[in-house]
Image (cartoon, helix red, strand yellow):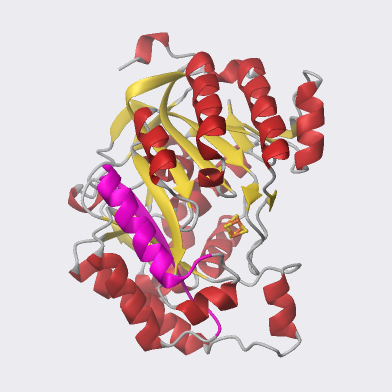
Amino acid sequence: MYIRNWPLYCQTITLSKGIKKMPLLCHTISVMNCALYIHIPFCVRKCLYCDFISVPFTEEMARGYIRALCIELTLRQDLATPLDTVYIGGGTPSLLGTTLLFGLFNCISDTCIISSQAEITVEANPGTVDSNTLGVLLSRGVNRLSIGVQSFQDNELKTLGRIHTADEAVHAIAAVTSSGFSNISLDLMYGIPCQSMSSWKDSLSKAVRSAPAHISAYELTPEKNTPLYGLLSSGRLDLLDEDLIIDMYHYAIDFLGAHGYGHYEVSNFALPGQACRHNLNYWNRGEYAGVGAGAHSFIDSSRFYNTGDVTEYVAELSGGRLTKTQEKTLTPGEAIEEYIFLGLRKTIGICLSDPLLSKVDITAASRNLARQGYLKIDGDYLHLTRQGMLVSNMVIIKLLQALNL
Ligand code: SF4
């Protein structure tokens, strides 16, 4: 490990390994962990439910953006440290094409030190992966691909405004697998208007049949200011019945569990040892640097983010100026709140003997919610029950209120 030479901002955090087999004590392995997120804000077109920072792809804009990213990577002092995880997300990074991807990876290797065991993930969407792109990713050390499948049903993909069909998703997975990637994650969605229990079961079966290492199953949340929200509020589409959505979630946990996928976070499932290290770092409150439009960073107890305006981002960086905004150093109370609401997303929960919790009586604060079946203490951990996971936001808010920080 690089412990001696790591700068101070890279605090020691606990990284859970082999979550299911861990004894229920705070016997986690202490490792130094630094993560880099790079945002690529380009898509073919906007999906109807999307409120992420993304704009339509043009070659010229993407070229300017990659140049700006390289400048940011050069200017950011906080990257001169071995990175344990790199995550290139979006947007649709797989849209960049081989030349821009090469350029991006050259900048990363010129400016960052990446640990030899690093997890390096790139997000890809069906319809945008070809053998040339996959070849570049493999040759530059990418060892994990996260594919936004969302559904294996054409009518659901259409309702979501996705650019691909179910067949194209199947072909994309086959192409990724045959190109040599062994660590693949698939994103699926439930709660899609027009989805049925049987179509959800079919999508889960097809996902499992392609044997990915990891599956994310997200409930569709209609965000304001999206076309989907407009369609729902004007009555042109109907939300699914809440009980059906709950049944879909229960089914996913049981079905994926029966096929060897451990439920390690509210929406995430993995084969043993294949949990996403980059995302676990967020939920463990590890530090990370975010680069690109709208990217967030958490360094040295301070949170800040870049402008989400892609044009402004490119203009500022082209002039050699970082767009860091709204830097906020967390108070001790805010740090505890974060530890709780991020940590409780993990099925293992939060470690009660963590020094951060030494000044609060979390056992007493959680008593009522535990009595109601939403929280449970196992050994030295407090975690959400399955019932609690269904209403995790409400449970966490009530727990924080009881703590009165
Ligand atoms: S592919 Fe992802 S980022 Fe792009 S528009 Fe669709 S949901 Fe948004």
Give the quarter of the image for residue 171: bottom left
Task: Describe residue 367's horizontal placement relative to residue 252 as left or right.
Answer: right
- Name the residue rendered at 52%, 73% in the picture: 157
Depth check: give the residue in front, 95 or 84. Answer: 95
Against 276, is 149 above or below? below
- For ligand 1, the image quadrant comes to bottom right
Against 282, is 222 above or below? below
- Name the residue rendered at 34%, 57% in the picture: 173
- Percent across and percent down for residue 46 are 66, 61
Report the magenta residues as a range.
164-193
All told, the count of numbered labels is 0
Residue 349 in view in this figure: yes
* The N terminus lies in quadrant: top left
Against 258, is 144 above or below? above
In magenta stretch: residue 166 = yes
Depth check: give the residue in front, 50 or 393. Answer: 50
Against 208, is 55 above or below? above
- Percent across and percent down for residue 32 are 38, 25
Task: Describe residue 369's horizontal placement relative to residue 405 as left or right.
Answer: left
- Percent across and percent down for residue 122 are 45, 42
Give the quarter of the image for residue 33: top left
Task: Describe residue 90's horizontal placement relative to residue 250 as left or right.
Answer: right
- Name the residue rendered at 42%, 54% in the picture: 147
In magenta stretch: residue 181 = yes
- Percent across and percent down for residue 356 are 47, 38
Residue 265 in view in this figure: no
Residue at the top extreme of this rendering: 5
Depth check: give the residue in front, 262 or 348. Answer: 262
